[in-house]
Image (cartoon, grey):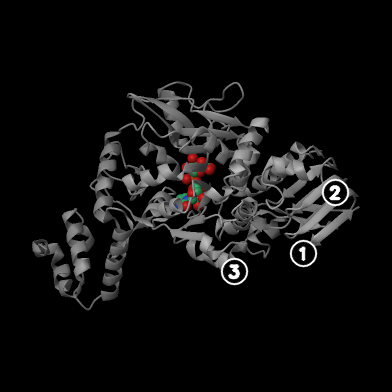
Amino acid sequence: MDTAFLDAAELAGLKANWGAISDAHKELISTLVQNGQTGLFMDWDEPGTNDTAKSAFLESLAKIDGNYPGGLAGYIKNARRLLAESKEGKNPFEGLTPEQPEKVDLTEFTADFEKYEAIGAKQFDKVGVVLVAGGLGERLGYNGIKLDIAVEVLESTPYIKHYADNLLAMQARSESKRPVPFIIMVSQDTGPKTLETLEANNYFGLKKEQVHILKQELVPAIADNEGTLALEEKYRLILKPHGHGDIHMLLYTSGLAEKLQGEGIEHLMFIQDTNGPSFNTLPAAIGVSVENNYDFNSLAINRIPGEAVGGLTKLVGNGKEMTLNVEYNQLEPLLKATISPEGDVPNEQGYSMFPGNCNTLVIRLASYVRILNESQGIIAEFVNPKYTDETKTAFKKPTRLETMMQDLPKLFGESEKVGVTVFSRMWSFSPNKNNIADAAAKVAAGGPADASATAENDFYAAGRARLQVAGMEVQEAGQEMILGVPFTLGPKVILRPSFAMTLAEGKEKISGGSLSGESTLIIDGENIALENVRLSGKSALIVKACAGAKVTVKGAFENDGFELVKLTEAERSAESRVPEYLKIRGYKFENCGAAVFEFDQPGEYTVEA
Ligand code: UGB
C-alpha cells in the first residue's frame, strides 16, 4: 500500500497512530483518502488520547463499507454522479410523457374479482411476504414501533399479529401446508423492539425459521457536491436512513431472494408496516400477476389530487416506455410540463389522472433474482439536497443517497411486464401514518386522514363488505367526528383471516342475516358458519373456534354490545397512563355485555340465540 499520503501535514496525527491500526483498516483509510475523504482523518489526537473513539470510528467505517455493495468507494462514486446530475438540474423525466399504465380494475367485487382470487388462492404456498418496517413513523409521533400499534381496539390486535394471522391462514389453506416465508426489514431504530415483540409473543404462532429479519443500515451523510462524507464530530460520521429501497439490496446480499426461488417461491408480496388491508388484496393481486404474466404488479387506488401517494404512470418517450411510480412531490411538475398545464387536477370522477401507489407490490421472483444479480440490489438511488442558493454549490444540511422499493422497474428491460391493479380504497389502502392534528388538517383540506381512526374504520368496512358480498343485510351507521377525524360508528365487523381469505369463502360460510348500524360482529375460526344471524341495536356477537371445532351460529342476538367512549383531554395528555395506541386515536370501546362464544376443543357445536 502506498502510504505517501500520510506525509500531508494535516494527517500527522493519523501517521502517529498508524502503527496501532489493523491492516484492514489501513487499507480502508487509504481507499477513502484516494476518494477525497482526507477530511475524515484530519487532526487526529496523539496515540493515547481518544483511542477508543478512534477505533470505534474505524469500526463504523468498516461496517458501512461492508454493508454497501461496492463499499464506501462505490457509495462516494454514486453520490458524485447523482449530485452532478442534480446540480445540472437534470430532469429525470426529460423527453417522457405520462400515459395510462396497463391496469386491471378490481374496484368492484365482480365475477372477475373472484376469478382472480381463485387463481391467487391456489398459489398460497408459492408466495413470500416482505414487510418493510425500518421507518420510525415520525409523522405519526408514536413512541414505539408501528408494528406494535393496534389496528383495531375492540380486541386491540397489533399490526404484526394481524399480518402473522394472515400468513397462518394462507398456510392452512394451501395443499402443502408449507410455512409462508415472512421477511421483515428492520433498522437500528426498529430492530430490537420488533424482535422483542416476536419473542414475547412466540412469533404469533409462526415458526421462528419462517421469519427472516433483515436489518437495513444507515448510510453516511454527504456534505458537498464532491461527495465528502460529513462528520458529526471528530471520529463520528453523520448517518441517515437510506429508504425502503434497501429491501432489494438486503434480499440480494443475504442471498435470501435466490434461496426462496430455489425453494419454489414464485412471487413476493411487499407490504408496508401499517397498511392493515394489504392482505385483503393478496389473493386477487397474486391472481392478476399469474394470469397477466406480470413481473411487477403495483397495487393502486383511485388517487385524490395532491394526495401524498405516488402516481402510477406509463412514461413514453426516447424510444422507450416504462411503467413507473412518479413520487408525489414530482407528479405535479411532470403533469404541468407535459399533459396537464393545470397540474394535478381532478378528472370527471374527482380523481387524479393516474392511479395512486399503495406501495403494495407483487414481484415475480424469477425476474427479481435476475435483476438483483445484475444490479447488486442497488435500485435507482437518488439524492435530494436542499441547496443554500441557486448556484447549487452548498447544502443547507448534509444530504444522503436514498432508494424507494417501488423504483425497481427502472431497471427493467423490454421483456419485463409491469402492470397496475386498482382496488377500492377501504379494501386495499388505509395506512396509519398521521397524528390526529395533522390528520384533522388533511380532512379539513378534503383529503384522506390516513390516521389510526380511519385505519380502524376501514378495517371494519372491509369486514362489512365481505358480509354484503355474501348476502347479509348490513345497515351502515352515520359518522362521528373525533378530534376532526371521521369515524363510522358501525357495524364494526372483524372477520379474521382464519374465517375467510377470499370472497368465495365468505359466501360459503354465511347465509342470510342482518346487522344493524351500531352492532359488532367478530368471527375467528375456519369452520364457523353463520345462518341468518341477526344483530339489532348495539348488540355484539363474538364467536371463536379452534381448528377442528365446527360451529353453526343462528338467530337474533340482543345485548348492549360495545360503547364508543371518547378520551378526555386529560386522558390524552402525555402524563396519562392510557395506552398510547388509544391516545393516538382519541377513543376507546367499552364492552357493555357482548355475547361471547369460544370453542377451544374440536367437536361440533351450535350457537343459537
Ligand atoms: N421504511 C423502511 O423500512 N425504511 C426506511 O428507510 C424508510 C421507510 P413511509 P413514504 O403509502 O402513503 C411511500 O415513510 O416513503 C418503511 C411511497 O413512497 O411511511 O413517504 C416504513 O417503515 C409513496 O409512493 O412512506 O411514501 C413503511 O413501512 C406512497 O405509497 C414504508 O417503508 C406512501 O408510501 C413506507 O415509509 C404511502
Instruction: Indicate yes or no: mark 2 CB to ligand 1 under 8 Å.
Output: no
* Residue where numbered disc 3 is placed: 200
Query: Residue at 24% across / 76% down in the picture?
Result: 49
Q: Where is residue 46 in the image (x, y as percent from the top left)?
A: 18, 74
- The residue at label 3 has a CB less than 8 Å from ligand 1: no
Q: Which of marks 3 and 1 is nearer the N terminus?
A: 3
Q: Can residue 487 be seen in this view?
A: no
- Label 2 vs 3, first from the N-terminus: 3
Q: Name the residue under label 2.
A: 538
Q: Look at the numbered disc 1 and give the secondary structure of its residue.
A: loop
Real-space CA distance between mark 2 and mark 1, rounded to the nearest whole angstrom: 27 Å
Q: Residue 277 occupies which quadrant of the picture?
A: top right
> In which image quadrant can residue 300 be found?
top right
Q: What residue type is labelled 3?
A: Ala
In this image, 593 relative to 524: left or right? right
Return the residue nearer the eye: 130 or 175.
175
Q: Are marks 2 and 1 in contact (CB under 8 Å)?
A: no
Find disc 1 in the rendering and name its residue. Answer: 600
Query: As displayed, is residue 463 above or below residue 197?
Result: above
Compare marks 2 and 1 and give the one earlier in the sequence: 2
